[in-house]
Amino acid sequence: MAGQNDFVNAPLSDAHTFETRPSDPRLARWLEEYPPAVFSERLYQSIELMERYSIELAVDLSRRLNLIDQLDEWRSADEFCQLLSFQPRFKFALGWILERLVETGCAEARTDGDIRSYHLRHAPSQADLKRLRGIGLSIDPANAATLDLLDHAASLYPAVASGEQTGDQNLFGPQGIPLWLNYFDNDNLTYAVNNWVGAVPAADRLSTRRTIRILELGAGTGSASEILLRLFDQCGLLPRIERYLITEPNAFFRRSGQRKLAKQYPNLALEWAALDLDLPWNSQGVAPGEFDLVYAVNVMHISKDLLFSLNEARSALANDGWLVIGECLRPYVNQPIYPELMFQILESFTSVQTDPEIRPNPGFMTADHWRSAFTRAGFGHAKVAPDINRIREVYPHFFTGAICGQRTLRTSDS
């Protein structure tokens, strides 16, 4: 989390209180192209609860990792790793915990060049996670899926920090897999919103095509595919699908999605394969110019070389084809957001090539960074929907959007 933190949040109220405010009425106007049930008051309240819950988990982790005792002096995340013998890779998760402490008002931060340092103002109060969990379930019982995954991920932090275990082994082990299956489910509205945000602009951009060929990346268990097909059906586009290749490198997830979608759409020509974003796609059965839509939800941010993967996606598209990706977005540079707690101890999340202009940090990016990346990769009409930069002014916890870009001819294509 090095660099200037552009996100400023007032200190939180007492840990034993939790209040939600009605959403700004302008949000409904800016989101009118999406089904009203997606961006409901229940969703906003759930997001606020998850933000608060993750902050209190961070407070709890700051004690379990012995950070509080070491915050009597100004220290950076790198210095904490050296002082406490944490793995160097853990500095990203550590920076997130420290930024969440700043949000509570119990710690302060300062930036000197590229170094972000932290100092304790006063000891944080004890969190009442059980009470917050009860509130979350009263808002929506389906919130259990996200709360369970947050709890499980947080429980792994000390062992990952010390190097005793890896996040990948444990989060995707026997205990973790059922939690992911519940989380990546369209009954879990805090995740399903990502699928809807991607599907709506994808359907809109293909609405005038007589035939449609789709390549989906990193489909997981098929929740994004399910919403895309549901929306295509509602828009009368389903009969136009000539080919739909759904790729997922995890064999268990791929088989799970295949069973579900084959049962729901027995007459649709669905194909299934594994595809590695970081290797040449044409060597994995994806021919150049083969698709009208390359689609992905919460996948592209783990590309080791983002421009390579974006260029591969562009090559897979026919002229005037579209790349549409739904992504968890960071509204402001360096703003900590609750989904990171679940992902930032995964090597695939942090072991990526950074770039000061388009990808200054591993993990989730801002709308502006995504637009710049699409433009640099040669996509025309690069746009983020909805308008995150306008929405964040009235609601800084809006964490999802779709980045769209079209393959247009450029000099190197002729």
Image: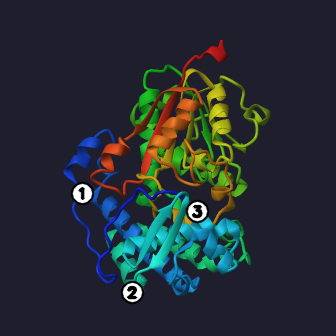
- Residues at marks 3 and 1, CA–CA distance in whole angstroms: 28 Å
The amino acid on which the numbered mark 2 sits, given as a three-letter code, is Ser
The vertical placement of 3 against 342, above or below, is above
**Which one is closest to the eye, mark 2 or mark 1?**
2
Residue that mark 2 sits on: 125
Q: Residue extending furthest front?
A: 112
Q: Amino acid type of disc 1?
A: Ser
Q: Quadrant of the N terminus?
A: bottom right
> Which residue is label 1 attached to?
23
Q: Three-letter amino acid code at disc 3?
A: Phe
How crowded is the residue under tag 2: few (<14 C-alpha within 10 Å), some, or many (20+)?
A: some
Residue 343 is tagged as 3
At 32% from the left edge and 84% from the top edge, which residue is drawn?
16
- So how many labels did they put on this image? 3
| Residue at screen point 41% across, 56% down | 6
First-in-chain label (3 vs 1): 1
Instruction: Say which element carries label 2.
Output: loop
Would you identify the image quadrant in which residue 163 lies? bottom right
Residue 193 lies, with reference to residue 408, above or below; the image says: below
